[in-house]
């Protein structure tokens, strides 16, 4: 039994980047010859969008060589009404009490509901431990409290908690995997006490700037560890650049090299900080910042860039600072650059 796991696609429009990511996931499922594709909630971004896209989705999900398993998430919990059609390859879990038995694998689906605490724990305990030979899987959409996430890691959810659970809630249920959705930032895995793994797949496309790094899906086989498969979809990538006035290379060239090294599906989160010596490089502060802003625009990072550069050429020419540099060169210290930065910042504060 091979299972491909994803969640939090948050579809909005047909043929946009999120739709294309879903099509890529379906292609991977075909290539890997999986038996099941598990989508653990929030296939749609809103209930209205789900209503509009259902005919397109049913065509996309039909005539597949594998079964597609869906659970409602907090964004689309009312989309999956009884009798609604999502494709002839699709099974929608509308209650936890009706697991699916598939060739030695038992799959439960926990559709999103407004439960927490003892009531939530009691509902989970309705899962009946299967045969030792069976492969036991649960699809879940909610918040793992043990992970100490920030609210931003769940997308634009505000301060509310959705189906909050601890790993201990799943202990003793005999689950090999809890395939979870709701956490957007990245693919993450935790061990369940007593055995089994709790896995967030992360979103297949970066929905917010918090979702950094290549997007992935999760391939599972009985008795083997999860295999991460990288997607071609868009993702945000932090690009920090530290500028010092002693660098021989032009600051804009340093930034250009960092941006050029990114893969084509990366959206840079550019952060450039530091100091320049305008006399040394033959450019003033305004010119350097303008060049870097033009580079950011060229790489579609203009709205996602932060630039803080100061020309300290005049300070470097002061006798006091030259004396400090000479003494710094004469000592053996593991972080002379750090000491230099500290002294320069202190001097800038005094200059205010």
Image (tube, grey):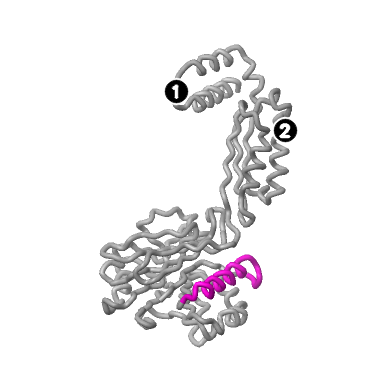
**Residue 333 image label:** 1
**Real-space CA distance between mark 2 and mark 1, rounded to the nearest whole angstrom:** 34 Å
Along the line of sight, which residue is nearer the eye, 303 or 271? 271
Instruction: Give the overall secondary structure of the magenta segment.
Output: helix
**Helix, strand or loop at mark 2:** helix
Q: Is residue 59 above or below residue 158?
A: below
- Quickly name the residue at label 2: 286
Label 1 neighbour load within 10 Å: few <14, some 14-19, many 20+: few
Label 2 crowd bin: few (<14), some (14–19), many (20+), radius 10 Å = few
The C terminus appears in which quarter of the rendering?
top right
Query: Hey, which quadrant is residue 315 in on the image?
Result: top right
Picture coordinates of residue 251, whole percent (x, y): 66, 34
Q: Foreground: 77 or 288?
A: 288
Q: Residue furthest bottom?
A: 83
What is the x, y in percent for residue 72? Answer: 47, 74
- Which x, y percent locates residue 46? 56, 70
């Amino acid at each position: 039994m091979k299972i491909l796991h994803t969640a939090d696609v948050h579809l909005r429009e047909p043929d946009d980047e999120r739709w294309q990511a879903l099509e890529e996931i379906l292609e991977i499922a075909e290539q890997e010859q999986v038996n099941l594709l598990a989508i653990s909630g929030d296939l749609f971004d809103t209930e209205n969008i789900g209503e509009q896209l259902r005919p397109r989705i049913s065509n996309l999900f039909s005539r597949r060589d594998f079964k597609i398993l869906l659970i409602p998430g907090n964004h689309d919990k009312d989309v999956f009404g009884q009798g609604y059609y999502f494709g002839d390859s699709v099974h929608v879990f509308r209650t936890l009490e009706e697991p699916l038995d598939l060739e030695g694998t038992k799959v439960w689906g926990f559709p999103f509901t407004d439960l927490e605490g003892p009531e939530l724990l009691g509902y989970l305990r309705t899962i009946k431990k299967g045969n030792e030979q069976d492969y036991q899987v649960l699809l879940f959409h909610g918040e793992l409290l043990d992970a100490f996430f920030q609210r931003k890691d769940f997308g634009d959810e505000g301060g509310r908690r959705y189906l909050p659970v601890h790993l201990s809630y799943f202990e003793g249920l005999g689950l090999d995997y809890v395939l979870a959705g709701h956490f957007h930032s990245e693919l993450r895995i935790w061990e369940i006490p007593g055995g089994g793994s709790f896995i967030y797949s992360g979103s297949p496309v970066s929905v917010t700037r918090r979702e950094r790094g290549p997007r992935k899906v999760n391939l599972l086989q009985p008795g083997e560890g999860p295999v991460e498969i990288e997607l071609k979809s868009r993702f945000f990538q932090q690009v920090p650049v530290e500028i010092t006035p002693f660098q021989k290379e032009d600051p804009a060239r340093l930034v250009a090299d960092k941006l050029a090294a990114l893969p084509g599906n990366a959206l840079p989160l550019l952060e450039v900080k530091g100091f320049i010596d305008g006399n040394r490089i033959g450019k003033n502060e305004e010119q350097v910042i303008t060049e870097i802003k033009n580079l950011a625009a060229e790489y579609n990072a203009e709205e996602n860039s932060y630039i803080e550069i100061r020309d300290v050429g005049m300070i470097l020419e002061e006798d006091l600072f030259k004396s400090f540099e000479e003494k710094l060169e004469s000592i053996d210290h593991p972080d002379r650059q750090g000491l230099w930065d500290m002294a320069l910042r202190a001097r800038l504060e005094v200059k205010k």
